[in-house]
Image: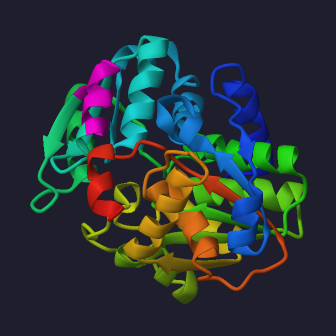
């Protein structure tokens, strides 16, 4: 299991390579949410999302033989871009399995970082199976997007920095797809601010993690129809499910309409470009979907790789 010591080690491993992203505050946002808000801007991270943290922590720890073999992963976009960039920096061959309906800018960025992209139809195939088959065929090292101890520890450094910069928090709201960011953040927050309540937030169309958290049984969802493409994961992982159950205080789901209202505010009033998945945590507070008021609230804005061509449809 992943511990705070693993997160502290990851912080040393990525220091000087990953950005220590800013913690943004806004009186206008405080008034809109009814709380003192602290936004950890991972939309400003390298490759545009928190995923760079875990990817660098994992790939940089590989042996020379493993690096020579190359790595493979599956991702709808942000982990793909992060792993591709990390491999470019470290001189490692990267193969990325991505859905055909992945956002075009994420596909383009992954290729621009030098990775080989293998496309698949999510209606007829599963990315996990394709990645496993290719790894076995070519000898690649599989580094999954969330269910890996070094990935989880790396992602937890975002919350570690947030608490260090903002001070103790009453609540921390974290986006949830496969649970790597959520579980790592919860471990870090509980260690550094024991009184902090950690809340995971996912899209309503893909509320498998919320159902899993509340029932104690692992639920799955297939290709959820949501604009939060980074949270279209089928389920929590074998590692992240028990970590979320152990360290997270509560979970909820928000609608795509909630995401759009939140994005429009963040884009136009805070001047921050954040993708739909990136505002999951903030959407819960901004739209008053979770009863908190008058608290010190941290939120991780998990990514900024927005499909700007879609903005005209989102912000009508």
- Determine if residue 134 is in view: yes
Q: Quadrant of residue 88?
A: top left
Q: Position of residue 143 (x, y in %)?
A: 43, 38
Res 57 → quadrant: top right
Q: Is residue 109 magenta?
A: yes
Magenta span of residues: 105-116
Q: In which quarter of the image is the N terminus?
A: bottom right
Magenta segment includes 51: no
Residue 24 coordinates in the image, percent (x, y): 72, 47
Q: Where is residue 286 in the image (x, y as percent from the top left)?
A: 61, 72
Residue at position x 36%, y 61% in the image = 315
Name which residue lies at 43% across and 20% down: 87
Judge whether 137 appears above or below 208 on screen: above
278 lies left or right of 164: left
Residue 149 spot, x, y in % from top left: 59, 46
- Vertical arrangement, residue 296 with respect to residue 219, above or below: above
Q: Is residue 174 left or right of residue 259?
A: right
Please name the predominant secondary structure of the magenta segment in the image: helix
Q: Nearer the viewer, residue 264 or 72?
A: 264
Residue found 49% across the figure and 13% down from its top: 90
């Amino acid at each position: 299991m992943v511990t705070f010591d693993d997160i502290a080690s990851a912080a040393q491993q990525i220091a000087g390579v990953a950005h220590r992203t800013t913690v943004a505050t806004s009186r206008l946002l405080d008034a809109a949410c009814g709380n003192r808000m602290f936004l950890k801007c991972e939309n400003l991270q390298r490759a545009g999302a928190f995923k760079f943290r875990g990817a660098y922590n994992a790939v940089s720890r590989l042996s020379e033989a493993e690096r020579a073999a190359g790595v493979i992963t599956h991702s709808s976009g942000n982990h793909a871009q992060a792993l591709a960039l990390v491999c470019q920096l470290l001189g490692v061959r990267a193969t990325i399995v991505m859905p055909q309906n992945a956002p075009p800018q994420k596909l383009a960025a992954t290729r621009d970082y030098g990775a080989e992209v293998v496309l698949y139809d999510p209606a007829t195939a599963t990315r996990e199976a394709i990645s496993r088959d290719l790894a076995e065929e070519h000898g690649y090292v599989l580094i999954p997007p969330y269910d890996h101890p070094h990935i989880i520890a790396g992602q937890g450094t975002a919350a570690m920095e947030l608490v260090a910069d903002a001070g103790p928090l009453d609540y921390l709201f974290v986006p949830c797809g496969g649970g790597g960011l959520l579980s790592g953040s919860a471990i870090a927050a509980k260690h550094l601010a024991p009184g902090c309540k950690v809340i995971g937030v996912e899209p309503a169309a893909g509320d498998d993690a919320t159902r899993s958290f509340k029932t104690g049984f692992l639920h799955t969802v297939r290709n959820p129809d949501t604009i939060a493409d980074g949270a279209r994961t089928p389920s929590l992982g074998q590692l992240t499910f028990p970590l979320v159950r152990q360290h997270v205080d509560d979970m909820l789901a928000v609608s795509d309409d909630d995401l759009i209202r939140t994005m429009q505010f963040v884009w136009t009033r805070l001047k921050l470009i954040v993708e739909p998945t990136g505002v999951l945590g903030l959407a819960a507070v901004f739209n008053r979907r979770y009863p908190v008021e008058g608290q010190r609230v941290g939120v991780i804005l998990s990514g900024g790789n927005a499909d700007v061509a879609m903005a005209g449809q989102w912000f009508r």
